[in-house]
Image: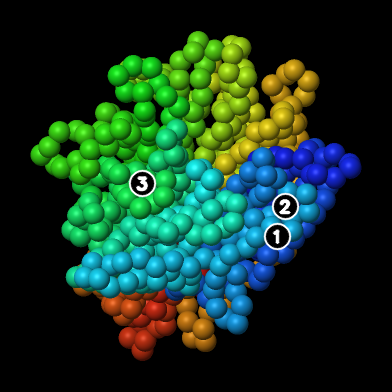
């Protein structure tokens, strides 16, 4: 993400002058305490030097020019502690540090370097490698523990990178004795592992018993076994991470793997207890447009192509690089807000079934399909439920837009620009934060604060606060080029690239694939290719990365 300002819940500073405080984290490894009303910066703390894009596997393009604090922190108000994960670069080495910061002055109460090890099949071991692991999903505090999930950088270095879920004591930051490695295979036909935990920045979820839930992404097709390789799955784990308790895997797991159509592109929403025969429910959705409603007491394992439908219900919401929202209306009925493609939809929940209640107006949202929402409501009175959403940019230069909808009648209440987003290769996974009558939107190098006017549901103008400077894009090696286009005529790792404007270019991607510096290739996929031209005019790829579907979002070829 492009220096995305991630923010945690509001809490007061413990000083004689009371402030309503918003805590903001940036990709430059900085933490801010900001007055939530005036925007005054009260405190700033650097947690180290962020990792430059040039040090990421393949120069992964889904990030800003630096990667620092990439996940949303979490706050423990009882102990006045903010937990944050910082990605740092020292002596040309990457490392993750989990910090427990004091809310009053952002000083360290404790800090620990992330290390872990897990057993592979055949009694081998795999050690955590910060250089190929991206800590993207939000932190979770539950069971007196801080949990963090890890993915890859652009699926590059798939021969090394695997998904992790790790935990630390909230009071001491001592690591849990157990951890979860999502792909434990010692060998693989293509040396391609992954099973990353992405969820587009959404965090692991926990139920009332403290059990944990994550959704995993792609691995090598036909390696899924439900035990040592649990890609493309909604996974339920014990609080101490010692056991996978259950999982749900769609029947087309191999096809999802082959098309890089991650189930784990979206988060998992665990619902509060519901009335009826299925009190414990969750929903999860991914790239293939399916949103699954599941009973968390019986996820059912692998949902084989010729077997029963183990999930309670499957509904279509559109491609989901997103997370669902939940609210209860004044009528006492529970509802879910889905946000696949550009379509927010409100679903009623009753007796373990979803029914579509209302399609809200489409929003302008580009990059990958989907977006994040939040719901504000007093939970009792009619006409107080508002759905908030932030659309992703649709052009380059890019803006992000804040929307507000009346959940009762679907009427659009507000739309307005809420910030900029210059790195259109990286999704603007922005979740609006609503607190104390204000709405906060963090984007590139700024924070927009929107306030309500009196008792009217009219949103006032946003005010921006610069938080970082601009860093130039990744430099190319001498003689190297960087081009965008669509794969046509793929055969054996060589393909024609149809560029913007219609011109075609022959690309040899075999070396990039052999060295695990290539995204999954298939006809019709949009890609960014970095490489050098030979005398015959063929572009020999050093790295092949995914690109956004819309050419309007592509940076200029170089």
**Does 222 sit left or right of 299 as displayed?**
left
Q: Residues within 10 Å of mark 1 (few under 14, many from 20)?
A: some
| Residue topped by disc 1 | 108
**Does 112 sit left or right of 229 as displayed?**
right
First in residue order: circle 1 vs circle 2: 2
Mark 1 and mark 2 residues within 8 Å of each other at the beta carbon: yes
Q: Nearer the viewer, residue 321 or 87?
A: 87
> Circle 3 sits in a helix, a strand or a loop, which is it?
strand
Please name the residue shown 34% across and 40% down the image: 289
Depicted 478 relative to depicted 426: above or below: below
Which label sits on residue 237?
A: 3
Mark 2 and mark 3 residues within 8 Å of each other at the beta carbon: no
State the residue lying farthest toward the right.
16
Marks 1 and 2 sit apart, C-alpha to C-alpha, by 6 Å
Q: Nearer the viewer, residue 196 or 374?
A: 196
First in residue order: circle 1 vs circle 3: 1
Please name the residue shown 42% across and 46% down the image: 239
| Residue topped by disc 2 | 102
Q: Residues within 10 Å of mark 3 (few under 14, many from 20)?
A: many
**Does 83 sit left or right of 261 as displayed?**
right
State the residue lying farthest toward the left.
306
> Circle 2 sits in a helix, a strand or a loop, which is it?
strand
The answer to whether one can see residue 69 in this image is no
Which label sits on residue 62?
A: none
Q: Nearer the viewer, residue 289 or 116?
A: 116
């Amino acid at each position: 993400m492009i220096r995305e300002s991630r923010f945690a819940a509001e809490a007061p500073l413990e000083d004689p002058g009371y402030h309503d405080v918003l805590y903001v984290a940036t990709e430059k490894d900085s933490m801010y305490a900001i007055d939530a009303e005036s925007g005054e910066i009260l405190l700033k703390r650097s947690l180290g030097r962020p990792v430059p894009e040039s040090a990421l596997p393949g120069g992964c393009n889904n990030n800003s020019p630096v990667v620092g604090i990439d996940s949303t922190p979490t706050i423990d108000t009882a102990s006045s502690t903010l937990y944050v994960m910082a990605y740092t670069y020292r002596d040309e080495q990457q490392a993750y540090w989990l910090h427990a910061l004091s809310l009053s002055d952002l000083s360290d109460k404790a800090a620990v370097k992330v290390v872990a090890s897990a057993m592979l099949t055949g009694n081998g071991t795999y050690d955590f490698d910060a250089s190929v692991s991206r800590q993207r999903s939000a932190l979770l505090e539950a069971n007196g523990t801080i949990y963090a999930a890890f993915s890859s950088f652009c699926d590059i270095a798939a021969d090394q990178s695997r998904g992790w879920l790790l935990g630390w004591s909230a009071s001491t930051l001592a690591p849990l004795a157990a951890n979860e490695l999502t792909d434990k295979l010692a060998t693989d036909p293509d040396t391609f592992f992954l099973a990353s935990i992405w969820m587009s920045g959404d965090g692991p979820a926990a139920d009332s018993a403290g059990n944990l839930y994550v959704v995993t992404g792609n691995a090598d097709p036909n390696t899924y076994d439900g035990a040592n390789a649990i890609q493309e799955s909604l996974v339920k784990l014990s609080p101490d991470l010692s056991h996978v308790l259950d999982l749900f895997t769609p029947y087309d797991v191999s096809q999802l793997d082959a098309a890089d159509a991650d189930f784990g592109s979206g988060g998992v929403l665990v619902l509060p207890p519901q009335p009826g025969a299925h009190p414990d429910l969750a929903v999860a959705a991914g790239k293939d447009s399916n949103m699954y409603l599941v009973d968390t007491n019986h996820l059912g394992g692998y949902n084989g192509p010729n077997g029963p439908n183990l999930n309670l219900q499957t509904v279509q919401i559109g491609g989901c690089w997103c997370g669902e929202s939940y609210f209860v209306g004044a009528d006492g009925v529970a509802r879910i807000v889905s946000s696949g493609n550009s379509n927010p939809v409100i679903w009623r929940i009753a007796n373990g079934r979803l029914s579509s209640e209302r399609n809200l107006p489409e929003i302008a949202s580009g990059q990958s399909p989907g977006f994040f929402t939040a719901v504000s409501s007093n939970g009792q009175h009619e006409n107080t439920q508002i759905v908030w959403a932030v659309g992703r940019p649709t052009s380059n230069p890019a803006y992000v837009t804040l929307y507000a909808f009346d959940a009762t009648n679907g009427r659009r209440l507000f739309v307005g620009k809420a910030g900029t987003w210059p790195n259109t290769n990286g999704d603007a996974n922005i979740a609006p934060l609503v607190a104390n009558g204000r709405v906060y939107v963090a984007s590139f190098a700024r924070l927009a604060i929107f306030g309500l006017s009196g008792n009217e549901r009219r949103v006032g103008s946003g005010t921006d606060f610069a938080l970082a400077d601009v860093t130039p894009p990744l430099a190319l090696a001498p003689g190297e080029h960087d081009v965008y286009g669509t794969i046509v005529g793929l055969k054996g790792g060589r393909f024609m690239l149809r560029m913007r404007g219609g011109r075609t270019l022959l690309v040899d991607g075999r070396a990039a694939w052999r060295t695990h510096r290539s995204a999954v290739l298939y006809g019709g996929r949009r890609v960014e290719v970095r490489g050098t031209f030979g005398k015959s005019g063929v572009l020999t790829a050093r790295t092949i990365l995914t690109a956004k579907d819309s050419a309007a979002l592509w940076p200029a070829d170089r």
